[in-house]
Amino acid sequence: MIKNQWYGILDAKELKGSKPIGVTRMNEKLVLWRKADGSIGCIADKCCHRGAALHLGPVKNDEIYCPFHGFAYDVSGKVTLIPANGKAAPISDRYKVHAYKAVEQYGFIWVWTGDFKDEAPEVPFFKELREGFTYGGFGEVWDVHYTRAIENQLDVVHLPFVHTDSIGRGNRTVVNGPVVKWVDNLMTFYVDNHTDDGVSIAKKASELENYEDFFRLQLQMPNLWQNVIGDKIRIVAVFAPIDEEHTKIYVRFYQKFMMVPVLKQMVNWLSTPTNKHVFHQDRRVVNTQIPVKSEFTMGENLIPGDAPILEFRKRRALLKGEIVLKQK
């Protein structure tokens, strides 16, 4: 994972009440629980004593207790009680597990991949969606690394071949550009595809004028994506890393054209079958890609239409410290 980033890892509804939940995310087994004030604890799901899963234990006074020998952990991962030693016994700092800073915002649970004691920045959710929209959606697991799942949503070339009866109708196989722009760690890419007349050749990004009028999509690093269908309709996805070969994708349909109670929930609910159909068309192919994880360089023969994918790989490698951009 990329250090010092907010990763969306769960739909907030999955963490119910004070009951802890054990999940695998970012190649680690984690336990999450809610404190009395609604804030969230997230630590390694492995007791430092004998390795038992902490998510099987109870939560009391905002701390989680190991189900095996009663060790108590606070949200910083530090052991605060070893029952066998007595409540008054001092506890060495070596009795601890790794902890993540975790917050609930915008209906998701996010974890900060920097040090637990860091003063983390705000969660970088799309600003226009922070209020005024309602949503409905679903979550499912794909058998690929999260980088492959993200790249599929950056791929503007595949639509007429994978989505022949849905968003790929029209056989617009020629890809002009696309134009890719970054603002901090937010990528916006502008798409202009058309049918092949047998004469014209795809234009380079530098040749496109008024590209801001084109259809656009966005990727907020490290794992948040949106399809800007219109001012009142968006499709959003969080690509939650599970391990090297699995990703849980949370897909949401955001809208603000229907705000009447009951009717808005019905509209949001009715969006799910269509979105599932589109994403399942993708999953069928993406799950076959080799290797299941993408890298900055990996021997692929990319084409100009793959510009958003290449830009994602560059930015990810840059944030991980694997490459350094040359100063102009």
Image (spheres, helix red, strand yellow):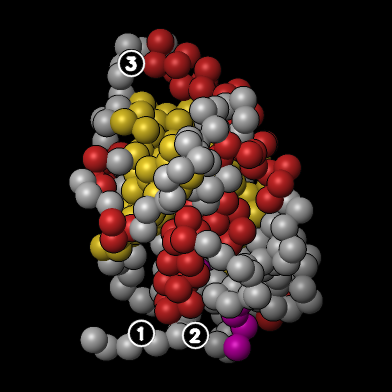
Q: Nearer the viewer, residue 115 or 189?
A: 189
Q: Is residue 183 above or below residue 247?
A: below
Circle 2: element type: loop
Q: CA distance from mark 1 to mark 3?
A: 45 Å
Question: According to the image, label 1 marks what residue?
Answer: 325
Q: CA distance from mark 1 to mark 2?
A: 10 Å
Mark yes or no: residue 231 visible.
yes
Q: Residue furthest left?
A: 210
Q: Residues within 10 Å of mark 1 (few under 14, many from 20)?
A: few
| 1 and 2 marks in contact (CB < 8 Å) | no
User: Disc 1 marks which amino acid?
Assistant: Leu
- The answer to if 95 sits in the magenta stretch is yes
Residue in the picture at 62% in, 83% down: 95
Q: Nearer the viewer, residue 253 or 111?
A: 253
Q: Residues within 10 Å of mark 3 (few under 14, many from 20)?
A: some
Residue in the picture at 58% in, 85% down: 91
| Numbered marks: total | 3
Q: Give the side of residue 43 with respect to residue 208, left or right.
A: right
Question: Residue 185: horizontal and vertical position, in percent?
Answer: 34, 65
Residue 258, disc:
3
Question: According to the image, label 2 marks what residue?
Answer: 322
Q: Quarter of the image for the C terminus: give it.
A: bottom left
Q: Give the side of residue 29 with respect to residue 229, left or right.
A: right
User: Disc 2 marks which amino acid?
Assistant: Glu
* Mark positioned earlier in the residue sequence (2 or 3): 3
Circle 3: element type: loop
Q: Which residues are magenta?
A: 94-101
Nearer the observer: mark 1 or 2; the answer is 1
Nearer the observer: mark 2 or 3; the answer is 2
Q: Nearer the viewer, residue 106 or 36?
A: 106
Q: CA distance from mark 2 to mark 3?
A: 46 Å
